[in-house]
Image: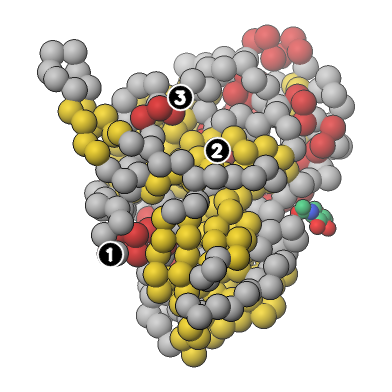
Amino acid sequence: MARLTALFAALVLASVTLASPVVEIREPLVTLPIARRLNATSGRTILEHDQARARNFLSRGKKSAEKRTASITVTNQVDTYVASVGVGSPATTYSLLIDTGSSNTWLGASKKYVKTSTSKSTGGSVSVSYGSGSFSGTEYTDTVTLGSGLVITGQSIGVASRASGFDGVDGILGIGPVDLTEGTVSNANTVPTVTDNLKSQGTISTEVIGIYYAPTTSESVANGELTFGGTDSSKITGSISYVSLTTTSPASAYWGINQSVNYNGATILSSTAGIVDTGTTLVLLATNAYNKYVSATGAKLDSSTGLLKITSAQYSKLTNLNFVIGGTTYALTPNAQIWPRSLNTAIGGTSSGIYLIVGDLGSNSGEGLDFINGYGFLERYYSVFDTTNKRVGFATTSQTTSTSN
Ligand SMILES: *[C@@H]1O[C@H](CO)[C@@H](O)[C@H](O)[C@H]1NC(C)=O
Ligand SMILES: *[C@@H]1O[C@H](CO)[C@@H](O)[C@H](O)[C@H]1NC(C)=O
């Protein structure tokens, strides 16, 4: 991974309209570069990871009436975004997966935890199961440095004594809702997330995370950015539209929203709840919606990659796949619906094949979690995760309609 440095963005343009003066709010926004890594031998592995993650989201959500167990989500190690995070003083740098679908921050999967004078054991044991991985160990508090300058003191972190399924990364930076930490640490009810602590320690004034990903055409590249405390206006081309978090369970346990999906003038998924997730590669649709998309596009499931495949004649007829969220339509252009062709051989495809990034969620709609907007969506729209105002926002970027794939 390229060496990364933190950037301190200066401005937030809070409101820009033609008739009124520009309102500038100066905030100490902290922007952390993030890098996408693809480590897959087949598209099928990616689909299986995404589906396993979906099953875990569903099953955990259904337990929400009971005391939450430690089992939460799967992290997609085959294709993921990582950030360099410093822990301790002096800090040791760890490569952590950015995960909006889980909320414990932990390390020790690859690089060992280096204890310094700021490391304190809480005496609690921690254990989290993800769909295709898990870790257990001891909970510590320590100083966490994001980028080169943003310091959180006393951040609760898990230190793995056992971890499986996390080859090549050191752990997770969990930026999901704090309730997902319930039941994961033996002597704590919930464990404040890094975003919670940035707010409570006065470093940021609003508990907001802005995420920018660009379409990726190589296997490892620093092309994303995670902003704490606000949004990075330099990455956004329009204005941000917000939607309230959904009240439908189990999507409501995560960054859940209501959305409908249409293709070529026909509704393929009526308004229903699902989630926005940085740990999922594809865009997953409930089976009944996925089947409608398959018939509308003429795609066939490709046995070598496990992904949908279309011919070039079908590609030339592809139309926008539209996601309607809070009254705003977010289109995935035909080019945004296909897997980057420069990465075809990395997933077991042929270099000239045209594979689709829409996958089957694995269950019909009506489950309360009927879609997952993963990277396929998030690489085309800037996303905003706003804990303070209980909402999610999206905005167009220079990549929304780019022909990168
Ligand atoms: C890639 O995946 C293989 C097989 O799962 C694993 O052995 C390897 O460590 C992974 N590499 C990285 C950089 O994640
Ligand atoms: C989302 O959809 C559900 C089910 O149709 C509805 O009850 C709810 O009011 C909608 N809006 C929100 C913000 O949850």
Q: CA distance from mark 3 to mark 2?
A: 12 Å
User: Is residue 273 in sight in this rendering?
Assistant: no
- Looking at marks 2 and 1 on the same chain, the residue that comes earlier in the sequence is marked by 1
Label 1 sits on a secondary structure element that is helix
Number of other residues with Cα within 10 Å of mark 1, as a class: few under 14, some 14 to 19, many 20 or more: some
Which quarter of the rendering shows the C terminus? top right
Q: Which residue lies most toward the left here?
A: 20
Q: Amino acid at mark 2?
A: Gly
**For this view, does 403 lie left or right of residue 231?**
right
Label 2 sits on a secondary structure element that is strand
| Location of residue 191 by image quarter | bottom left
Q: Which mark is residue 224?
A: 2
Which quarter of the rendering shows the N terminus? top right
Label 3 sits on a secondary structure element that is loop
Nearest to the observer: residue 216 or residue 200:
200
Identify residue for label 1. Answer: 200
Q: Looking at the image, do the residues carrying marks 2 and 1 touch, with CB atoms under 8 Å apart? A: no
| Location of residue 12 by image quarter | top left
Which residue appears at 30% of the width and 56% of the height? 203
Q: Amino acid at mark 3?
A: Thr
Which residue appears at 40% of the width and 64% of the height? 152
Nearest to the observer: residue 133 or residue 253:
133
**For this view, does 87 lie left or right of residue 136?**
left
Q: Which mark is residue 365?
A: none
Identify residue for label 3. Answer: 397
Number of other residues with Cα within 10 Å of mark 2, as a class: few under 14, some 14 to 19, many 20 or more: many
